[in-house]
Image (cartoon, grey):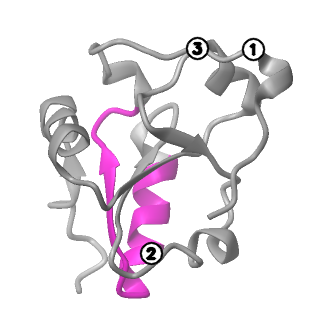
Amino acid sequence: MNNSDTSFGLTEYELSDLIQHDSNLVICDLRKKEDFAKGHIKRSILVQYNEKTLLDIPKLSKVVLISKDEEQSKKMAIVLRSHDIEAFYLVGGIKNWSKGFYYTNISYVGTGYI
């Protein structure tokens, strides 16, 4: 795969459709714990921006990475794709998501590991 390929960016509408129809979807939010608690996408889990942790994702999963802007999630998606994991990122990052957020009491937010 060509690492400069950006065809693996998803719009909010494409991601919304995947959330509704793909049971193998794993949404990884790479932001800080505090930002995740203030609002996150349905079915997303908070994970550390860490290649080693993210490589533990089951190979049959489709992974969507979320970050504040798309830069961090795009870089990690490229890394995951180089390891044959079907990874995508949200174009524009979380600031481009307008379909509603879920909120969590920060004391309940941990860093998820897959």
The residue that disc 1 covers is 105
**Amino acid residing under circle 3:** Tyr
| x and y, in percent, of residue 69 in the image | 45, 34
The numbered mark at residue 88 is: none
Name which quarter of the figure residue 94 lies in. Answer: top left
The residue that disc 3 covers is 103
Q: Which callout, 1 or 2, points to the residue nearer the camera?
A: 1
Q: Quadrant of the C terminus?
A: bottom right
Residue 96, relative to residue 63: is it above or below?
A: above
| x and y, in percent, of residue 53 in the image | 67, 70
Residue 71, relative to residue 57: is it above or below?
A: above
Please check the rendered image and state whether residue 89 is part of the magenta-colored stretch, yes or no: yes
Q: In front here: 109 or 76?
A: 109
Say few, some or many: other residues with alpha carbon within 10 Å of mark 2 (under 14 / 14 to 19 / 20 or more).
many
Horizontal side of 96 relative to 83 (left or right) equals left
Sequence-first disc among 1 and 2? 2
Q: Which callout, 3 or 2, points to the residue nearer the camera?
A: 3
Q: Which residue is located at x 41 percent, y 29 percent? A: 42
Q: Which residues are magenta?
A: 72-93
Q: In front here: 92 or 21?
A: 21
Q: Which residue is located at x 46 percent, y 77 percent? A: 58
**Amino acid residing under circle 1:** Asn
Name which quarter of the figure residue 113 lies in. Answer: bottom right
The residue that disc 2 covers is 80
Sequence-first disc among 3 and 2? 2
